[in-house]
Image (spheres, grey):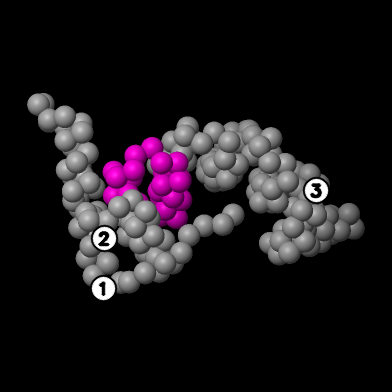
Amino acid sequence: MTVFQLLMLGAAAFFAFKIYEHVQTLKDPQEGESEDGAQRNANAFSPHNAQTLVAKAEDAYEQEDFSKALALLKEADTKDQNNPDILYRIGFMLEKLGDFDEALHQYKNALEFDKNNEYFHNSIASIYRVKGEYASARMHLNASLDIDPQNPVTHYNYGNLLVDMKNTEQALEMYEKAVELDPEFTQAQEEIAKLKTSLKDTSV
């Protein structure tokens, strides 16, 4: 699955820290203050628009500074609320930081606003797989295949799930389908080699 890239470090680090502080203190409008007023205050905090903040978050991700990337994306979310791409990126950063429950929440939020995105289903399935909730993971992978049965990433992820479920032969079929769809899919090729070796050893 494709993801993110791009920009600077010294001033950006300080700026991202200030954004993080601000995001942590954002609160609901006080009595007598309109929601529009609260939104204007949030938008006035930074001179950057949501698109610029996302680009800065991509750069932070490339630098493997996931906390800074998350802070920038949260600020972007205050400027462009309910944008499924931003919500998905927030979930991705949370997953990288190991906060799987909140990542799952953000992925589901993204799916609410883009119900036919197979990658959102894939990411939700990956969290359920980590949590050992295989039935839920399988449901979302099936939903992803319903949207796009020709996506090799989904077949690869399904193979990973089936390995965890000890369904080796079905997993092999999924990996082989991934390679059929994308002959350059190196990871799937490696998993096929592992499973074939494992099956050969158990048959001896």
**Label 1 Cα crowd, 10 Å radius (few <14 / some 14-19 / many 20+):** few
Is 155 displayed left or right of 35 in the figure?
right
Relative height, residue 128 to residue 157 (above, below): above
Q: Where does label 1 land, which residue?
A: 10
Q: Where does label 2 land, which residue?
A: 16
> Disc 3 vs disc 2: which is toward the camera?
2
Place of residue 51 in the rendered image (x, y in percent of width and height, measured from the top left): 37, 53
Is 43 displayed left or right of 60 in the figure?
left
Q: Residue at x 36, y 69 (%)?
A: 7
Q: Where does label 3 land, which residue?
A: 173
Is 172 displayed left or right of 71 in the figure?
right
- Could you give the CA–CA distance between mark 1 and mark 2, rounded to whole angstroms? 10 Å
Q: In the rendered structure, which disc, 1 or 3, sits on the residue that comes first in sequence?
A: 1
Which portion, as a residue range, is magenta?
73-98
Place of residue 120 in the rendered image (x, y in percent of width and height, measured from the top left): 54, 42
Q: In the rendered structure, which disc, 1 or 2, sits on the residue that comes first in sequence?
A: 1
Type of amino acid under label 2: Ala
- Secondary structure under tag 2 reads helix
State if disc 2 and disc 1 touch (CB < 8 Å): no
Residue 83 is covered by the magenta coloring:
yes
Q: Residue at x 21, y 54 (%)?
A: 46
Q: Is residue 108 at least partly visible in the picture?
A: no
- Could you give the CA–CA distance between mark 1 and mark 3, rounded to whole angstroms? 49 Å
Residue 61 is covered by the magenta coloring:
no
Q: In the rendered structure, which disc, 3 or 2, sits on the residue that comes first in sequence?
A: 2
Q: Quadrant of the C terminus?
A: bottom right
Kindly give the residue lying farthest to the right in the view shown.
204
Q: Residue at x 41, y 41 (%)?
A: 83
Type of amino acid under label 3: Glu
**Label 2 Cα crowd, 10 Å radius (few <14 / some 14-19 / many 20+):** many
Q: Is residue 15 at least partly visible in the picture?
A: yes
